[in-house]
Amino acid sequence: MANVLLPPEERNLTPDQVEALDKRRDLGHVLLVIAGQFTVIASVLLLWVGQDLTYSPGWIHPMAYYFFLCLIMIAVLGIAGLVLRRGTPRID
């Protein structure tokens, strides 16, 4: 009997398909971890962004640019990680 806790599309997978599914979910987990690390970096950069925007002349705001780059990386990696991790997690 099929495991009713699994989504219908995952109930009758071959071993190769299960391995591919695990690799996809592992990659999604890695991307979520990297997004979390960028979140820590962005929180540290946030300490300097206000000062950089206040005191840097003209368009020279490197800390602000790094901060916004981190925010973009967090969004892209986080969404990609969530999409790849969709489904029922593996229980070890």
Image (cartoon, rainbow, N blue to C red):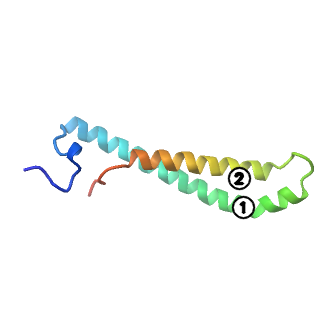
Q: Earlier in the sequence, mark 1 or mark 2?
A: 1
List the single residue furthest toward the front. Answer: 8
Q: Secondary structure at mark 2?
A: helix
Residue 13 found in image quarter: top left
Q: Residues within 10 Å of mark 2 (few under 14, many from 20)?
A: many
Left or right of 10 on screen, residue 37: right
Identity of the residue drawn at 48% across and 52% down? 32
Apparent side of residue 4 relative to residue 59 in the rendered image (left or right):
left
Q: Residue at x 87, y 45 (%)?
A: 59
Give the label on residue 67, or none.
2
Q: Are the residues at dot 1 and dot 2 in contact (C-beta closer than 8 Å)?
A: yes
Q: Is residue 36 left or right of residue 52?
A: left
The residue pinned by badge 1 equals 46
Which picture quadrant has residue 11?
top left
Q: Is residue 78 left or right of residue 9?
A: right
Quadrant location of the C terminus in the rendered image = bottom left
Q: Identify whether 40 is placed above or below 32.
A: below
Q: Position of residue 64 (x, y in %)?
A: 77, 52
Name above or below for residue 40 compared with residue 15. below
Q: Residue at x 23, y 50 (%)?
A: 7
Query: What is the total number of numbered labels drawn onto the structure image?
Result: 2
**How far, Cα to Cα, is label 1 from label 2?**
7 Å
Secondary-structure class at tag 1: helix
Please name whichever residue, 9 or 49, is drawn nearer the observer in this view of the structure: 9
The amino acid sitting under disc 2 is Phe
Where residue 91 appears, as percent x and y from the top left, is 26, 57
Q: Which mark is residue 38?
A: none
Residue ranking furthest to the right: 57
